[in-house]
Each structure stands twice: as C-alpha cells, then as structure tokens.
C-alpha cells in the first residue's frame, strides 16, 4: 500500500520537492554550523574568565579582558537559529525590547554608557576602562530590518549604521605616540563606506592617521576617489596606502594577509581598526580564526558574516558564498569580544 499519494500535477510535485530540499539544506547547514563552532563556543557566556560587569568600579581600569552580554544578547545567543527561523518569530522576539527607546535613542543622545541602561553589553579590555557595545541580537543588523511592517520595502534599514556603538576617545584616550590605523580588506572606493568611517571616527575623537586598503579589482585612482569632496580627498589621500588589484591571502606571515600587517604596525598604545568584507568565506574565515587565536592589538573589528538563513536568501543566496548559520556568527562575535575586541557585525 502506498503511504503517499502519487503526484497528479507536476507543479505540486515541484513545490513538494523544493520544500523537502529546503528542509534538508537547512538541517545540513545547522549541523555544519554546530560542528564548525563547537570549538569556539565560550564556556561562560557572561565573560571570558568569570568576571562580571560589577567587578570594575566606575572610572577604574580593567586588569584583564572579559565580556558581559546583555539580557537580549543572552536570549538570542542561546537560541540563535530558532529565533531567526522566520520573520514572524524574529520580529515578535525583538518587539518587547522596544528598540527605539532602549537602543537607538540612547545611542543618539549619548546615553548608551548610562548605568541605568540594560540593553547594551559590556567589554573590559586589559589596560582600558570598561566599554559598552551594541548587543548581538536578531540577524545582526539594524533590528528594524525585516521588522518595519509599515514599509513594503524589505530593503529598508538594510544598510543603516545608527544601531552600532563604536569606540570613541573615552574608550581609547590618547597616549604619547598614539596612532590610529584602519585596515580595510575589501575597499572598492573611498566613498561612501571608508569616508563614513573616517568622518565617524573623527567625530568620536579618534581621527585616523593611517589607512591601508586591499581590493582585488583593478580600480583607478580617479574611480577610487570619485564623489569625494576635494578637501576630504586632500586630507586623507596622503594617509592612505592602496593595494590595488591585490586580493588578500590567508597564509600566516604572508605580506597581503591583513593580520600580518596588523601585527607589524599596531602597538599597544595604538588604536587599530580592521574591516573584513571580501564576500568569500574561504578567505574570510581563516583570517577570522587567526584573529581569534592571536588578536594582537586590534581594537575594533567589522565583519559581515554571510550565513545560511531563509531570512537572508534574497541577499546572500542559499549555497555558495555562505558559511554556517546565525549560531556560528554569534559564537564568533562573542569569542572575539571576550578577547577584548570591539567586534561588530557589518552590513
């Protein structure tokens, strides 16, 4: 006796087959993600060494590096793949946290560091004062992304940045001989992204002194600086070194492995930022693991981790170019933060 009625109409068969394949792919990706990140999973989610956010009195310096996740971050960390399974679950989970009042407005009004705020996570880096970061939550983008039901455009909030809590001069006060270096792995043009970073850090009291940019495509000088005001070009062009038509590599000690240059150039008193966005997991992930194993003096890190998620199929695809699931992302960013790095999910 047949347990399943034979397909009578081809479109139903096709739809059923697609659904079965999608389910298989999802569980395969979830299993792969679990295997990939098992060795990364922190033993203590609150901090790297069992410390907590109350162990450093206000105004005092951290004697060791640790990290304290906020409540919303702990919720998503423990259930990352379940809570990002579909749009309804994601948005219903985020809704009670009142993003506008408890996340976006405190950043805009400079209140993210307020002791009364419970939204933001806390990082202690050895030798520095305690710092706050945006929590790891949702699909690791603006929480309004996919959850603004007043707009029919699912791309709205896709590229916004006002949900990020970036370092400022209170986190990294100037010391004698301090330099501020930016390493951009995957920088096609100066505008708009690199220009935004330069202006944002200047506004936050951390003007950049040196910028190093890798781009695998052959981009002319004119095209790289296109649409940048002349006074900004004149200011930053002397500070910027371009590795044009040069792709980054993963070999330890290789000249064009950004980690090699970071270890050579960044000192303890420097403020060093690393942005990794080359859209190639086979290149990105070895470098991410090198950063975890030996952070050197990286202060702040930006990385767009493309993962397998039905919510992101439209932008990241389903098979090639993705790596693990959101649970893997949460493990990576948590481990980096526990190392004392201000690690952010990039857009």
Image (cartoon, rainbow, N blue to C red):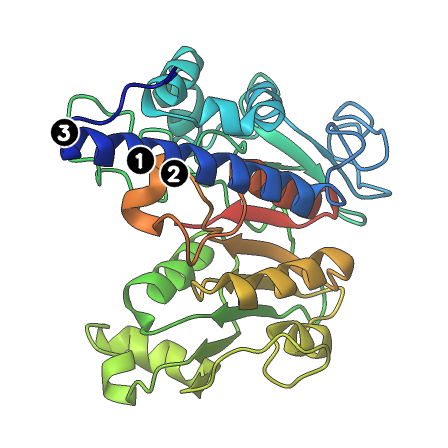
The reply to whether discs 2 and 3 touch (Cβ–Cβ < 8 Å) is no
Q: Residue at x 62, y 70 (%)?
A: 179
- Of badges 2 and 3, the one in the foreground is 3
Q: Secondary structure at mark 3?
A: loop
Say which residue label 1 marks.
17
Q: Is residue 84 above or below residue 195?
A: above
Nearest the viewer among 174 and 36 is 36
- Of badges 1 and 3, the one in the foreground is 3
Marks 2 and 1 sit apart, C-alpha to C-alpha, by: 6 Å
Nearest the viewer among 213 and 277 is 277
Marks 2 and 3 sit apart, C-alpha to C-alpha, by: 19 Å
**Quadrant containing the N terminus in the rendered view:** top left
Q: Residue at x 57, y 23 (%)?
A: 79
Say which residue label 2 marks.
21
Q: Is residue 122 above or below residue 276?
A: above
Reading the chain from its start, which is encountered first: label 2 or label 3?
A: 3
Residue 338 occupies quadrant:
top right
The reply to whether discs 2 and 1 touch (Cβ–Cβ < 8 Å) is yes
Q: Residue at x 80, y 48 (%)?
A: 126
Disc 3 crowd, CA 10 A, few/some/many (<14, 14-19, 20+): few
Say which residue label 3 marks.
9
Reading the chain from its start, which is encountered first: label 1 or label 3?
A: 3
Q: Position of residue 86 (x, y in %)?
A: 37, 25
Disc 2 crowd, CA 10 A, few/some/many (<14, 14-19, 20+): few
Residue 160 appears in view: no
Return the residue found at the far front: 1
Q: Residue at x 45, y 81 (%)?
A: 240
Q: Position of residue 146 (x, y in %)?
A: 29, 30
Q: Secondary structure at mark 1?
A: helix
Q: Position of residue 180 (x, y in %)?
A: 58, 67
Nearest the viewer among 307 and 110 is 307
Q: Is residue 118 above or below residue 284?
A: above
């Amino acid at each position: 006796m047949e347990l399943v009625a034979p397909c009578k109409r081809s479109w139903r068969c096709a739809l059923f087959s697609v659904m079965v394949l999608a389910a298989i792919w999802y569980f395969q990706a979830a299993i792969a993600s679990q295997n990939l990140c098992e060795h990364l999973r922190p033993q203590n989610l609150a901090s790297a060494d069992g410390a907590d956010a109350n162990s450093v009195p206000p105004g005092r310096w951290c004697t060791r590096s640790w990290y304290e996740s906020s409540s919303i971050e702990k919720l998503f960390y423990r259930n990352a793949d379940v809570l990002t399974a579909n749009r309804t679950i994601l948005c219903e989970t985020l809704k009670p946290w009142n993003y506008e009042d408890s996340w976006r407005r405190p950043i805009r009004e400079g209140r993210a560091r307020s002791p009364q705020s419970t939204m933001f996570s806390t990082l202690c880096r050895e030798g520095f004062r305690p710092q706050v970061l945006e929590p790891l939550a949702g699909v690791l983008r603006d929480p309004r992304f996919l959850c603004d039901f007043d707009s029919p455009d699912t791309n709205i909030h896709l590229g916004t940045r006002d949900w990020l809590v970036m370092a400022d001069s209170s986190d990294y006060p100037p010391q004698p001989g301090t330099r501020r270096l930016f390493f951009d792995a995957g920088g096609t043009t100066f505008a708009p992204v690199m220009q935004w970073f330069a202006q944002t850090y200047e506004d936050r009291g951390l003007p950049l002194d040196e910028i190093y940019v890798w781009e695998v495509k052959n981009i002319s000088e004119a095209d790289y600086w296109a649409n940048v005001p002349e006074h900004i070009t004149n200011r930053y062009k002397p500070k910027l070194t371009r590795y044009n038509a040069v792709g980054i590599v993963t070999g330890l000690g290789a000249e064009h492995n950004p980690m090699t240059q970071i270890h050579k150039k960044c000192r303890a008193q420097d403020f060093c930022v690393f942005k990794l966005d080359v859209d190639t997991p086979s290149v990105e992930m070895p470098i991410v693991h090198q950063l975890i194993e030996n952070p050197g003096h990286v202060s702040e890190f930006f990385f767009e981790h493309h993962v397998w998620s039905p919510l992101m199929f439209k932008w990241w695809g389903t098979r090639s170019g993705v790596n693990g699931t959101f649970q893997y992302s949460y493990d990576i960013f948590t481990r980096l933060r526990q190392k004392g790095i201000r690690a952010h999910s990039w857009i």
